[in-house]
Image: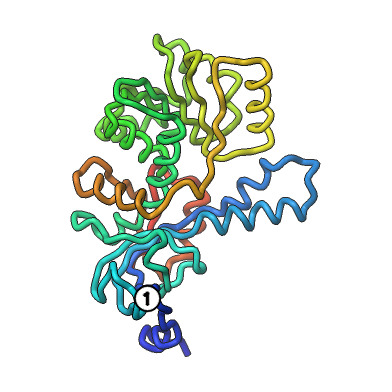
Amino acid sequence: MTKSIFEKSEALQPEAHELLVQVHAMSVMPDYCAQRSSQVSPPLSSLAKKTYCRKLYKLMGYDFSGVVIGRGKQVTNFQVGDQVFGISYQSNYDRLININEFDLVRHKPENLSYAEAAALPFGALNALYFIKAGQIQAGQKVLVYGADSAIGISALQLARAMQAEVTVVCQSRNAALLSFLGATVVLDIDEPIAPMLHDSFDVLLDVQSNHHYSRLCKLIKDDGRYIVAFYSWRTYFWHLWSLLIRQRSLISIKQRDAVNADDLLWVAHLAEQGKLIPVIDRLFDFSELSIAMEYIHQEPDIGSVVLQS
């Protein structure tokens, strides 16, 4: 017999600084282990690949939004009944989670639904790291290659919030939406982009990370930065190559621990101001998890796939 929410909550009594959250919506995360393990250098053993996958899986977590239904005795930042959102590393798509109040959890923006809030953290926090790594400033020219994803959509909006001029490369069917979200120039990813560009860029974010460095680096200024969303052995090769021969660009390898709860708070403020809009490709009920997982591996059209109650 399936346990009720009440029975499960009794078994998940929060510790001193923990919140007990009833989840109302959660993003469906692709199986990046399956997709990205192929990017690990072939000479590595299968054990090394499994270790890589476990680390990546643990670091990704799961975007969620919901309501606090219990709290530890020493919690000071939240009350029972508060609507919250964030990233949980607890387990797969649980409807009840414990999370420390000092981890990646903050009050949900009031202008977002639960589903919209659950679509926000992964893309926004990853994009924010890229913005930091790129040292993006007002007036700079930024190129986002593969802007259809949750990360690309957030990177576009965050760069625009910093008053940068943003060019995006995406599927042609998504051009209108990305223009609405602030892209200055929108280019078709299926067409050669170099002939259509007359300016070089201060920062280039390659969200797809499909080894475009050798041709895209020519679009970057001498002191520009080339940033990849997912590293691979080829990424390390180009990184070392650029250092050795002093090419015009430098690949910046991201570190997922470079964001914190304050960053999530800033993301929430931008969302409340309408400067960061989450984009949802499709909504599923929690009972349709297996269908949602099949759907997301078909590469959604744009944005996030979300489960909701």
Q: Is residue 284 visible?
A: no
Image location (x, y in percent) of residue 238: 65, 26
**Residue pictured at 49% horizontal, 63% vertical:** 89
Give the color scheme: rainbow, by chain, secondary structure or one colour: rainbow
Q: Which residue is mark 1?
A: 20
Image location (x, y in percent) of residue 81: 24, 74
Is 177 on the left or on the right of 64, as rendered? Answer: left
**Residue pictured at 47% horizontal, 14% vertical:** 221
**Residue pictured at 28% horizontal, 69% vertical:** 78
Mark 1 falls on what kind of element? strand
Residue 63, quarter of picture: bottom left
Q: Is residue 64 visible?
A: yes
Number of numbered discs present?
1
Image location (x, y in percent) of residue 174: 35, 34
Q: Is residue 163 above or below residue 221?
A: below
- Neighbour class for label 1 at 10 Å: few (<14), some, many (≥20)? many
Q: Is residue 112 above or below residue 223?
A: below
Assign the C terminus to one quadrant of the image: bottom left
Q: Amino acid at mark 1?
A: Leu
Q: Is residue 69 above or below residue 89?
A: below
Image location (x, y in percent) of residue 235: 63, 32
